[in-house]
Amino acid sequence: MTELDLAGRVVDLVRQLAGPGAEAEVVVTRADLALTRFANSFIHQNVAESGTTVRLRLHVDGRTAAGGGSLVDPDGLTALVERTLAAARLCPPDPAWPGLTPPAPVPSGAAVDEATADASPDERATRVRAFVDAVEGLEAAGYCRTAYRSGAFANSAGHSAVGRAAEAAMDGIARTGGADGVARQCADRLADLDGGALGARAAAKARAAADPVELPPGRYEVVLEPAAVADLLQNLAWYGFNGKRYAERQSFAEPGAAQFDPAVTLVDDPLHASGLPYDLEGTPRRALPLVEAGTTRAVAHDRRSGAEAGTGSTGHGMVGASTFGPLPRNLRLLPTGGTAEVATGPLSAGVTGAVADPDTAALVAGMARGLLVSDFWYTRVLDPKQLVVTGLTRNGVWLVEDGVPTRAVRDFRFTESYPRALGPGRVLGLGRAPVRQPDRVDGFWWEAPALRLASWNFTGGASG
Amino acid sequence: MTGFDAATAAVQAALDAGARYADARVMHRRYESMSARNGDIEELTQDESIGLGVRALVGSSWGFHAVPELSDAAARDAGRRAAAIATASARVPGPPIDLVAVEATVASWASACDVDPLGVPLTDKGDLLVRATATMREHGADLAEGLYQIWDTTKWFVSSEGHRIDQRIRECGGGISATSIGDGETQRRSYPSYRGQYGTTGWELVTSLDMAAHAARIAEESRELLTAPECPSGETDLILGGEQLALQIHESVGHAIELDRILGWEAAFAGTSWLDLSRLGTLRYGSELMNVTIDPTIPGALGSFGFDDEGSPAVRRDAVREGRWVGVLAGRDSAAVAGLDYGGSVRADGWARLPMVRMTNVGLEPGPHTLDEIIDATDDGVFMDLNRSWSIDDKRLNFQFGCEVGWEVKKGRRGRMLRNPTYTGIGPVFWRSMDMLSSEIVPWGTPNCGKGQPGQTGHTGHPAAPARFRNVRVGVRA
C-alpha cells in the first residue's frame, strides 16, 4: 500500500466515523534514516530506523484536534481516527479554524538520488574512514547521515500530493591539543560528500587553531564562515520570520522596512534542494523572498497564521507550528552581485590553514583588524523582539591584522542583536560561494557564503 | 506477539548474525499535550507509537536498528540489520569494548501514580488552561500561554545476558506564562517555570500546582517588568531561586559529569567536559555546601525509573560530596573504558533511539539555610528567579543565564524589581563561591534535555533550592 493509499484510507475512515461534514487532513511519511557517528577516530554509534508515521488533523462541529502515531495497520488507523475524533468533540470551539487546503497543483520537487535513498552502512562508513584518514593522526569526531522520505498528503476537500526526498550530510571535527577545526556539508547526493576533503579541511583548521591567545572582550569586526552564518539564519528564521511570533508582536520583522544592509537578500527556498514539495497542510512549497536587498518583504505562514494575517499560507505548516510558529527551514543568504560581494583571494597568507577557501580569503584580506570566526555554539535568545542572542565561538577563531590571520584566539562569549549586526551599513562583504549547512534534522538546512560584518559584540572570554 | 517475545526474537537474530552481545527494547508510548493561548485552546495532540530497537555488539563495534513493527519477522530482521550495521562500524574500529557486569534481572517496575493523567477528562484539563490563560489576559498579559504534557510509556527490555524487565512510567506536568510586550522588548513571567513542572507522577502533580491561583500575579509582574529598572552591570552577590539553580545544576554539573562527554564521545556535537577522570575523587568542584547526588530512586522526580535502558537497577550515587567530585553518569561500555564499576544512567528517547548516557535526577542535597535567611544575610546583591535563557560552552565551563525577573537586595531586604537580569561565570569558580544554601529542596523536572545524533529529548530531574553565590558578574547585555 502506498503512502497516498494510506492517507486516503484515513480520510475515508473519518468520513465513515464522523460523517461527511468532518474536515480531515492526513500526512503519511515513510522514512529510512541512518546516521554513522564517530569519535576518538572510530565509529562508536551507528544507527538506522525505518518506519511510517501518520498524522491526522480534523475539524468537526467547529472543534479541532490532531493526533498521530506509528500504528498503520487497520486497527491502528481506526484507533487513531476514533481517538482524534473523541478529542475534537471534547475540545472548546475553534473559531479561527482556517479550513482545508483546496485542490491545487503541487510541484514535483527535485529528483531523488536513488543511491542516497538506498545508501548502506558500508557507504557511510567508507566516508567516515576517509575523513579519519585525512586528519592524519589528529582525533576525528562527527557523523555521516543519509535520509530518505517518501510521503503523501490527502484531505477531505479533495486535495492530495505526493513527494520523495533524499539528503546526505557530513559534519566532522579534527582535534589537536584542545583546538578543533570543523568541516560540514549537506547535499542531495551522498556521492557529493567527500569525506577525505572534509577531513583535510577540518584538520587544517584544527592545526591552525592551536596555541590560542586570549584577547580582551569588546566589539570586533568579523568575518563569519558559512557555519557561523548558518546560526544567524537559523535564529532569524525561528524568531524573526515566524508568522506566529510576528502576529504576537514578538518579532523584529517589519515588512516593507529597510531593516538590513542592502547586501542582504534572504529567501526560503525549499525546492532548491531535495525535499517534500508540500507542507503539513498540503500547501505547495515554493520560494518565499523574506528580505530583498535589505528590505524585509514577508514572514512565513501556515494556514492559521496566514488567515490571521490576511496573507494566506506560504507553505510553512509543520508539526508544532501552532505552538512555536511556522518558520522558514531552508533559508538561503544569496550572493547579490552588489558592491559588498568580494572576488576570491589567495589562501596562503598568515596562519596556514586558518583560511580554507577563496571566498573567506578575500573577505579576510580586506579587514584591517578583526576576527575570523568558524562557528557559533549554544546560541540562545535573551530578548526575542530585538533578537538579542548570547552564545560562544567554537571550532576556531583567529585574529586578523592587515588582512592576514596572525594568531589563533581563544573562544569568546558574545551577546549581540542579530538584526542589528546585519543592519544597514553593517555588512562589509559577502562571499560568492554559498555552502549548504545541515541542521539537526534532515529537511532543514541553511545556505550562506562567508560574511564580513562591521561589528560583533564579544562580551567575555571563554575563561570568564 | 508480546513485547518480550519481539525483543527476544530480535536479540536472538542479532546473536545468530554474529553479535557477541545484544539487547532490545520494545516501547509503547502514548503522548498527549494541550496548549492554550489567551483563553482559547490552541492545540490538542495525542500520539501513540510502538516499536522495537535492537542494539548489537559485534567484536567491539556497535550497531542499532529500529522498526515500528512487532512481528516475529520484523523483529528478527531488525536484529540482523543491527548486527550488519555493527559489522560496518568495524571499518573504522576503536579500542576493545567491554561491558561492566550487571546482574541479569527478571523484574517489573512502575512509577507511582494516584490519578491517571490520560484518564482525566479533556474538558477538565482544557478548562484548567483556559481559565488560567483568560485570567492572565484580564490582568494585563499581551500573550497568555498554558501547557500540559503527558507521557505514558511501557517498555520491555531483553538482553542476551538474561535480562527481562518491563516498566511502566507515567510522567506529566504543566505550567503557564504571561508575556507583556513593550517598545522593542518583551517581558515574561511564568509559573512554576516556563515550560512548567514535571514528574514521574499522576495528574495530582498538576492539580497541586494550582496554576489558576498564580495567573493574575504573573500577568501583573510581566507588565510591571516593562518599566522596571534594568539589572545593573557589575560584580555582586547573587541569590538564585531554586528553579534557576536546577538549570544551573543541569547545565554546569549534570552534563559535565556525563562519562560519554568526558571520554570524548560527544566531542563533535554536544561537546566534551572540563573534567579529567584522573582527578575523580580529588577535584574540588565547589564549596563544601555542594553535595550533588545522582539519584533515580527519588519518588515522583522526573528522572526516576526502576531500571535504566541497559537493565541496570536504579541506584543512588554521589556525584559531588562536600565540594569534591566523586561520581559520574555512566553506561556499561563507557564505565568499562573508564575503569569504573557502575553504569546505570543510560536511557533512550523512544524505541527508535539508541540508549545513551543521560542524566537521571542530578541535584543538591539540602543546605542549612532558608531563602529568608539568605536574603537577611545579604547586604548588597541581586535575587534572580526563573530561567529565561541559557548558554554554556562545549566543555561546560563558561555559562551565561538570563532570568525572567530580578530583585535588588539591600541590607537584608528584597527591594525593587529588576528587568533583564543575566549572570555569567565559569562553572567551578561559580560553585566554589556558593556560601549559603537553602533546605527548601524541590525536585524540578526538565522535560526537554537535548543530546545525541539523531537528536534525543531526555527527561531529567534536579533537586534544588535557593542559594547564594559571591562576586558574580551580572547584567551582561548587547
Image (cartoon, rainbow, N blue to C red):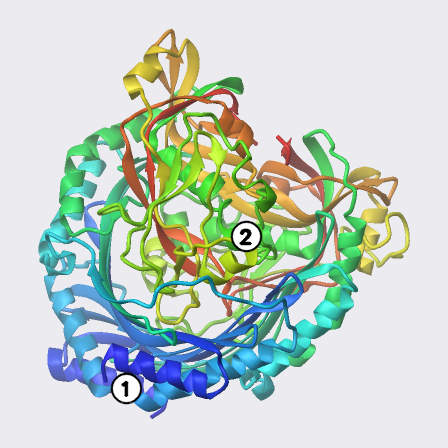
Image side of residue A287 versus residue A160, left or right: right
Residue furthest toward the top? B411
Q: Is residue B27 above or below residue A175?
A: below
Name the image quarter holding the N terminus of chain B. Answer: bottom left
Residue A58 versus residue A260 in the image, above or below: below
Q: Amino acid at mark 2?
A: Arg
Pair 1/2: label in front: 2
Residue holding disc 1: A8
Q: Chain of mark 1?
A: A
Task: Where is residue A276? Give x, y as percent.
Answer: 47, 77
**Residue at figure coordinates x 32%, y 76% from the top left:** B51
Q: Which mark is residue A362?
A: none
| Residue B309 lies in quadrant | bottom left
Are dots 1 and 2 on a single chain?
no
Query: How far from the left and from the top, in percent, is residue B452?
Result: 49, 60
Residue name at image x 19 percent, y 58 percent: A95
Residue ID for mark 2: B261
Task: Say what secondary structure mark 2 lies in.
Answer: helix
Q: Chain of mark 2?
A: B
Return the residue nearer the eye: A82 or A343. A82
